[in-house]
Structure formats: structure tokens, C-alpha cells
Image (cartoon, rainbow, N blue to C red):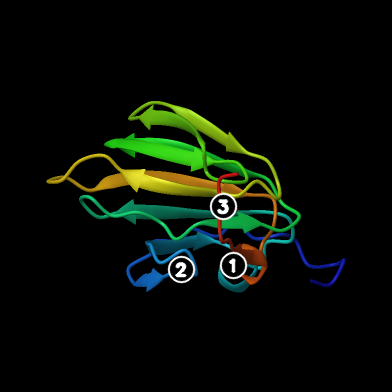
Amino acid sequence: MDAADPPDVKPIRPLEEVLTRQRLPYFVGISGSTVGARGLSMHLVVIPPGARADPHSHRGYETGIYVLEGRVETRYGPRLEQSVISQAGDFLFIPPGVPHEAINLSATEPARAVVARNDPAEQDKVDPYQPAAAG
């Protein structure tokens, strides 16, 4: 953007579902590619009934999640041995580099959440994770 150009306020209505590297359906909202964001991405994730994300970590950025609908178990740690449950109305913070997976606890209803990250191209830095063997 030229310094003489005033910044634009840009509304986004995501209409197209994409499959993320975590193997979950996303509706891409704010990102570097959609609005030219330089330090933020924000999306809607839908976890189908009984589904789970592939274990992964985020390289170099924080993630904030606000659960809109459903109950989600987030397993995390080297062996995904720790667990928290979030439900509608809860916020969840995931630091950079923490291995985790999200699991929809309902067999009949999808879970929906807003996901915000301090990286406008966050999918470029999602790393698959293979949990360490118990030992």
C-alpha cells in the first residue's frame, strides 16, 4: 500500500469451504491473501460430528479460539497426553509449537469456532505431528 493511500476497511463473507492441513473444514476470513492483513488471520472452523484434527503444531505463531457451538476436547503435549474441554462461550489459547489435536465430542452435531492467529499466512506454518511413544 502506498503511504498516500488511505487504509481500507474490508468486509469478508467466506462462502467457500477449504480443507486445512489439519484436515478440518475452514471458511477463510481475514488473511494476507483475502484482505492484505500483515499480522493477523481469522477464520471459522467446523469440526464435523465425531471428527478430529490431525495432530499438528503451529510454527512461530499463537492461536486464539472462541467456541461458538459444541464441545471440543483439545489434546496436547508430546504424547497428546494432556487434555482440556472447551464448549460454546469458551476461549482457548494455544502457544506456538505446542503439539495438539481437536476432537468434536458430539457424534451428532458439528462444533464451530472462530480461530485467530498472529500470522496472516498461518497455513504455511502448520506442521504435522506424530506423538512420541509412551515410555
Label 1 Cα crowd, 10 Å radius (few <14 / some 14-19 / many 20+): some
For the residues marked 1 and 2, what is the alpha-carbon distance in whole angstroms? 7 Å
Are circles 1 and 2 on residues that touch, CB within 8 Å? yes
Front residue (pair 46, 79): 79
Q: What percent of the width, then of the height, locates residue 128? A: 57, 66
For the residues marked 2 and 3, what is the alpha-carbon distance in whole angstroms? 26 Å
Q: What percent of the width, then of the height, locates residue 120? A: 66, 62
Q: What percent of the width, then of the height, locates residue 15? A: 32, 68
Quick one: label 3 or label 1, which is nearer the N terminus? 1
The kind of residue on which mark 1 rests is Gln
The kind of residue on which mark 3 rests is Ala
- Residue placed under numbered mark 1 in the picture: 123
Query: Which image quarter: residue 31?
Result: bottom right
Which residue corresponds to the image point at 44% horizontal and 45% vertical from the top-left? Answer: 114
Query: Which image quarter: residue 113?
Result: top left
Determine which of the numbered discs, if any, sits on residue 20 in the image.
2
